[in-house]
Amino acid sequence: RLGFTGGAGIVSNSFAVPFGGCLIYGQQKKGMTESLGLQPGYFPNKVSDDTRLAEFARAHNCALIDWCEAALVLPNADSFTQYFCME
């Protein structure tokens, strides 16, 4: 479940799960994921699992969008590996 830093309460229908070196978080509505976020480097001692994440994205017809960098990462292992290896 997600909450607000320094604030009271929890974001309704939220979830957060570790995946490789990342944290995947989001909200669901009626059992379907409505929004999904990814925070790379959340677990710095773990290896990134970019190949499995790319396979998941491809299977669910999703792409990774980095809004801060204005980058679109296509759902294939090469693109995800390149993205997660950026400094």
Image: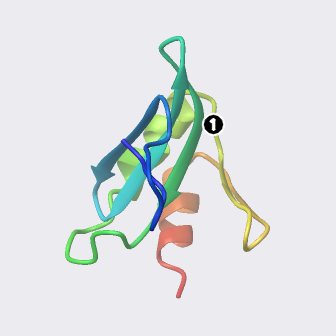
Count of picture labels: 1
Q: In the rendered view, does 26 fall on the left or right side of 47?
A: right
In terms of image quadrants, where is residue 35? top right
Q: In the rendered view, does 48 fall on the left or right side of 69?
A: left
Q: Residue at x 48, y 46 (%)?
A: 54
**Quick one: 47 or 11, which is closer to the camera?**
11
In the displayed structure, 16 sits above or below 46; it is above
Name the residue furthest right: 70
**Quick one: 49 or 23, which is closer to the camera?**
23
> Pointer 1: what residue?
62
Name the residue furthest top: 30
In the displayed structure, 83 sits above or below 1; it is below
In the displayed structure, 3 sits above or below 86; it is above
Secondary structure, mark 1, is: loop
Name the residue furthest front: 8
Q: Quadrant of the N terminus?
A: top left
- Residue 81 x/y as whole percent: 47, 65
Mark 1 Cα-neighbour bin, 10 Å: few <14, some 14–19, many ≥20: some
Q: Residue at x 53, y 11 (%)?
A: 30
Q: In the rendered view, does 34 fall on the left or right side of 12?
A: right
Q: Which colour scheme appears in the figure?
A: rainbow
Q: Residue at x 55, y 27 (%)?
A: 60
- Residue 12 x/y as whole percent: 49, 32
**Quick one: 52 or 69, which is closer to the camera?**
69
Residue flagged by tag 1: what amino acid is it?
Cys
- Residue 29 x/y as whole percent: 56, 19
In terms of image quadrants, where is residue 49? bottom left
Name the residue furthest left: 45
